[in-house]
Amino acid sequence: MHDYVDPKADTERMLMTGPIVVIAFTMLFSLLTQKMAAFRAVLLGTLVSMVAFAVLAVNGSLYAAYGTLVVIALGELIQQPRYYDYISRLAPPGQQGTYMGFAFLPLGIGSFLAGRIGGALLHRFGEVQHRPQIFLWALTAIGLATTFLLWVYDRIVKPSEQ
């Protein structure tokens, strides 16, 4: 943020943006998505969250950075509650706890890989090429690929919902 957008940016204030949006709109988004199929909400939330990086790639301003954080939070509001609903429906009777525990596996894998991949991309496109917007487009592409692979999974595996 300080190197590529605004050296005077208040990153502490920025980091509060997502949690504030989530806290303020959790009830509203729960109501808006309660009739949506769980997997469709997961797909839509993932798509919205990942397209958010394109906002900052298109306009590298401080306002766009805040907008990106808001859009990521909105995607999380759509996706996250329904993710656990979806996981619990995959589980056979009596195995919901085990499945819910494994629901954190993708988050763990993502935490392990994200720093390495993100660091390498930011180094290449930010520090070496001085084109940080390409880094943001790469994040958007990863997110779109993730959304596509989730869609393919749904079409091929087709888990039954109760």
Image: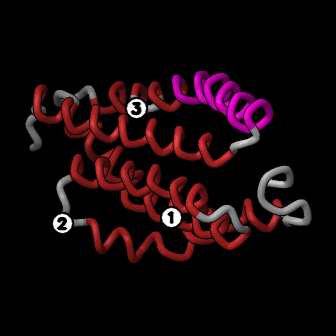
Give the number of the mark in front: 1 or 2: 1
Which secondary structure dominates the residues rendered in magenta? helix
The disc, 1 or 3, on the residue closer to the chain's N-terminal end is: 1
Who's the residue at 44% across and 40% down the image?
141
**Left or right placement of residue 47 versus residue 8 in this view:** left
x then y, percent, for residue 15: 73, 60
The answer to whether the residue labelled 1 contacts the one labelled 3, judged by CB atoms less than 8 Å apart, is no
User: In front: 74, or 91?
Assistant: 74
Residue 38 in percent (x, y) is at 23, 51
- Does 118 lie within the magenta span? yes
Q: Return the residue at label 1.
A: 71
Q: Nearer the viewer, mark 1 or mark 3?
A: 1
Residue 12: where, in percent of width, then height? 83, 61
The boundaries of the magenta stretch are 109-129
* Place of residue 126 in the rendered image (x, y in percent of width and height, measured from the top left): 74, 38
Residue highlighted by disc 2 = 35
Q: Quadrant of the N terminus?
A: bottom right
Residue labelled with disc 3: 103
In what element is the residue under mark 3? loop
Which residue type carries mark 1? Answer: Val
- The part of the image, by quadrant, that contains residue 27 is bottom left
Secondary structure of the residue carrying tag 2 is loop
Residue 66 included in the magenta stretch of the image: no
- Identify the mark nearer the N-term, 1 or 2: 2
- Which image quadrant is residue 51 in? bottom left
Vertical comparison of 42 with 74: above or below = above
Label 2 and label 3: CA atoms lie apart by 22 Å
Q: Is residue 25 above or below residue 71?
A: below
Is residue 2 shown left or right of residue 27?
A: right
Question: At 61% across and 25% down in the image, what residue appears?
Answer: 117
